[in-house]
Image (cartoon, rainbow, N blue to C red):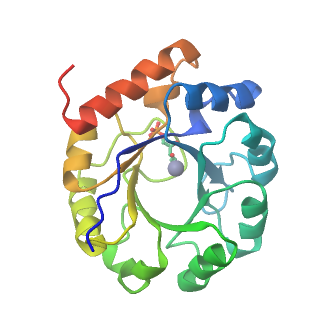
Amino acid sequence: MTVTRPLRIAPSILSADFARLGAEVQAIAEAGADYIHVDVMDGHFVPNISFGAPVMNAVRGATDKIFDVHLMIAPTDPYLSDFAKGGADIITVHAEAGPHLHRSLQAIRALGKKAGVALNPATPVSAIEHVIDDCDLVLVMSVNPGFGGQSFIPESLNKIAQARALIGGRDIDLEVDGGVTADNARAIVQAGANVLVAGSAIYAGNDPTTYAERIRTIRHAATGMVV
Ligand code: DX5
Ligand code: ZN
């Protein structure tokens, strides 16, 4: 059966004002976000530290929207249950984070959560060929993970198309993360993605009155709607 997944806009709270994190999550949800993208960094797997499960849990009550948790940490397995209990709906681990990706994906599903796998720019799509049926989401990184505000790596478009071919008609989200803007959203969706993460393109300036229009602009651009 072929499944066409709906377009989802997933603002990354990495670019939110951390001093007002709960309000920022609520504001982005009310502005039309589909998923709340939660970037967790450990200063080891990636060269930056963000926040962990307790901080995520503290803002979980701000909305009922899906929490899409992107773990840029190694190891991952010891922390999966903290994020599951803390309110994650989707938990994504990196294919490069450890030698036992299959075990990590099974552990996430055993916790009752959707399992995602992320690929760094240099990691081929073939790395997940044998675990694709254990995934609910594939995340193609279009920058090197660790920081918001970087430029989209153009080669990512080829990789998104390869990931789409691997997924085929399976009921799996194909997410793209890093440097997503209204200018490249159409090309990303045409290559086969259906979930667009955007941090700085939505949160820059941290003015809640701008969020709805920015989300709408990316959504319209992605669908080819002329505005
Ligand atoms: C990068 C993070 C991204 C990041 C995206 O390591 O995984 O989610 O916040 O930020 P922008 O959209 O600013 O590239
Ligand atoms: Zn991310």
Tell me where residue 7 appears, x and y as whole percent: 35, 46
Query: For the N terminus, which image quadrant?
Result: bottom left
Q: Residue at x 22, y 19 (%)?
A: 227
For residue 114, say whether it is visible. yes
Q: Is residue 110 above or below residue 156?
A: below
Where residue 157 sits, quadrant-wise, is bottom left
Relative to the observer, which residue lies in front, 183 or 106?
Answer: 106
Tell me where residue 123 appears, x and y as whole percent: 38, 70
Q: Residue at x 46, y 21 (%)?
A: 212
Where residue 37 sits, quadrant-wise, is top right
Tell me where residue 70 appears, x and y as whole percent: 57, 56
Image label count: 0
| 4 to the left or right of 208 | left
Q: Residue at x 67, y 37 (%)?
A: 63
| 187 to the left or right of 103 | left
Q: Residue at x 27, y 71 (%)?
A: 169
Q: Is residue 113 above or below residue 175?
A: below
Tell me where residue 128 appears, x and y as whole percent: 40, 78
Q: Is residue 68 above or below residue 3?
A: above
| 190 to the left or right of 68 | left
For residue 183, say whether it is visible. no
Q: Is residue 123 above or below residue 145?
A: below
